[in-house]
Image: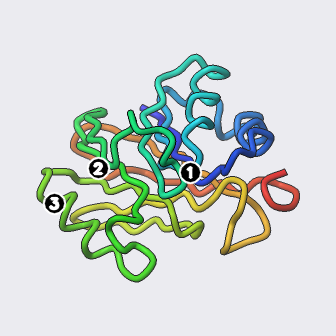
Amino acid sequence: MKIGIVSDSHGNTGALDAMLAHPAADGVSCWLFAGDIAGDGEYLSMVTRQTVIRVAGNNDWPYSSLQDVEIAEIEGHRIFLTHGHLFGVSFSTAALQEAARAEGADLAVYGHTHVADCSPGEITVLNPGSIARPRDSTRGSFLIVSLMPDQQPECRLIRLSGAKGC
């Protein structure tokens, strides 16, 4: 199954539209939205008519119905999804990995840093960077992940053309 992972759109639905127009987004069955701004996850669900699993970020305080962590089971993989700010990801992903391990997850997905991360291991750690406000490039980014039972995930970081998610 092909899933998409996006984070930190900060109200820039134009960046989400550019992401969806990218050929890599074709065939995505499900999206994970790692927070900041939660309403953009609703927008993504509306325009794609697909499942969007989303969590609250540090800027999503008005969305009290959203959880800080969601656990998703997709294609035999257990995914720990969070924004990351509550796990100190700006300094290290150790606490994030430990929390994912405690939940029996083999993938830990986060956002918050606006810096992409694809680190395979016992727990594969994934951060799509920011689709709208990247700190590691002048171009927004998202992840495409292929999941198959009993296989390591295949991850592709996709950078949008143009500047700052445009």
User: Residue 158: horizontal and vertical position, in percent?
Assistant: 65, 54
Mark 1 vs mark 2: which is more N-terminal?
1
Q: Secondary structure at mark 2?
A: strand
The amino acid type, in three-letter code, at marker 1 is: Asp
Instruction: Indicate whether 32 appears above or below 59.
Output: above
**Proximity of marks 2 and 3: CB atoms separated by less than 8 Å:** no
**Proximity of marks 1 and 2: CB atoms separated by less than 8 Å:** no
Quote the CA–CA distance across marks 2 and 3.
9 Å
Mark on residue 49?
none
- For the point 53% across and 40% down, which residue is it? 4
Which residue is tagged 1?
A: 36
Instruction: Indicate whether 53 appears above or below 111.
Output: above
Quote the CA–CA distance across marks 1 and 2.
17 Å
User: Residue 166: horizontal and vertical position, in percent?
Assistant: 85, 51
Mark 2 vs mark 3: which is more N-terminal?
2
The image quarter containing residue 66 is top left
Which residue is tagged 3?
A: 101
- For the point 81% across and 60% down, which residue is it? 164
The amino acid type, in three-letter code, at marker 2 is: Phe
Mark on residue 80?
2
